[in-house]
Amino acid sequence: MTEPVPTDEKDARPVEIVRAGLAVTPELRGIIGTMVLTGLLYGVGRVMIPVLFQQIIDRGLLAEGGLDRPELRRLIVITTAVLLGVTVLSWISNLVVIRVAEQAVARLRTRLLRRAVDLSMAEHARERQGDLVSRVTGDIETLTQFLDWGAYAWFVNMSIAFTAVVAMFVYSPPLAVVALLTLLAMVPVVRAIQRRQQVGYLAVRDRTGDLLGDVAESLNGAEAVRAFGRQDDVRARLWSRVD
């Protein structure tokens, strides 16, 4: 049977999880400023692109008196520069964030393995077989995916949302209010989905630990299993864990 998910892990807030991650990986603190700055610039650039295209149409193609070629050329140059700048900025920021994140995760993985090896036999006996392996592998893989994309996407999406709200209020305040009310209505739904995802992830991690523990016990006791003719029972138990 899968053990119940600890309450403190289920109720942990994302900010608390990020704070705990920064506490054990101080290498990541150095790139927080870079992520915030590049995320803001990238978000502003993303919002500027449709505005510039609108200006090309309104002030260049459909200008009063017909096609305004000088203004059209100027706007095309500005739009091209913004597009290239956003692309280069995204590539550089992703490269920096991923490189630092991979180095930090590699050091964290080494420390975790060292910690697991240094545990006493009594502590290993209290833990389920496979639970430590599941934590070191599954949690580290999830952390790697978050640092490679999720953390940077947080800053980018927040900057895009903030800049888009400002642009909407400039163009049409009533439409901006309607959009904000729609977003506020989505907040409880998103929070409920996040809670279910967190509980599901912890349950999968526990089941992975059970599977690894059963595999380890089956391999360590292979001779005893064959001696007592319990191959079918062990095979059925392993397949039930896989399912």
Image (spheres, rainbow, N blue to C red):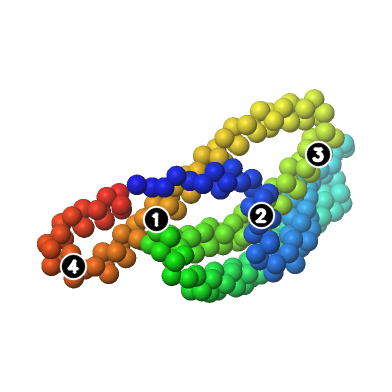
Which badge, 2 or 4, comes first in the chain's sequence? 2
Q: CA distance from mark 4 to mark 1?
A: 24 Å
Using a 10 Å C-alpha cutoff, classify the residue at mark 2 as few (fewer than 14 neighbours), some (14 to 19) or many (20 or more): few
Which badge, 4 or 1, comes first in the chain's sequence? 1
Does residue 172 sit above or below 73 in this rendering? above
Q: Pointer 3 and pointer 2: residues touching (CB < 8 Å)?
A: no
Q: Pointer 1 and pointer 2: residues touching (CB < 8 Å)?
A: no
Which badge, 3 or 2, comes first in the chain's sequence? 2
Query: Which residue is depicted at the point 74% across and 50% down?
Result: 43
Residue corresponding to mark 1: 208
Q: CA distance from mark 2 to mark 4?
A: 46 Å
Q: Nearer the viewer, mark 3 or mark 2?
A: 2
Q: Pointer 3 and pointer 4: residues touching (CB < 8 Å)?
A: no
Q: In the rendered structure, which amino acid carries the disc numbered 1?
A: Thr
Query: Which residue is depicted at the point 74% across and 55% down?
Result: 39
Q: CA distance from mark 3 to mark 2?
A: 30 Å
Query: Which residue is depicted at the point 27% across and 69% down?
Result: 220
Q: In the rendered structure, which amino acid carries the disc numbered 3?
A: Ala
Q: Position of residue 164 (x, y in %)?
A: 76, 41
Residue corresponding to mark 4: 224
- SS at mark 4 in the image: helix
Residue corresponding to mark 2: 18
Q: Position of residue 222 (x, y in %)?
A: 21, 68
Residue corresponding to mark 3: 167
Using a 10 Å C-alpha cutoff, classify the residue at mark 3 as few (fewer than 14 neighbours), some (14 to 19) or many (20 or more): some
Q: CA distance from mark 1 to mark 2?
A: 24 Å
**Residue 105 visible:** yes
- SS at mark 3 in the image: helix
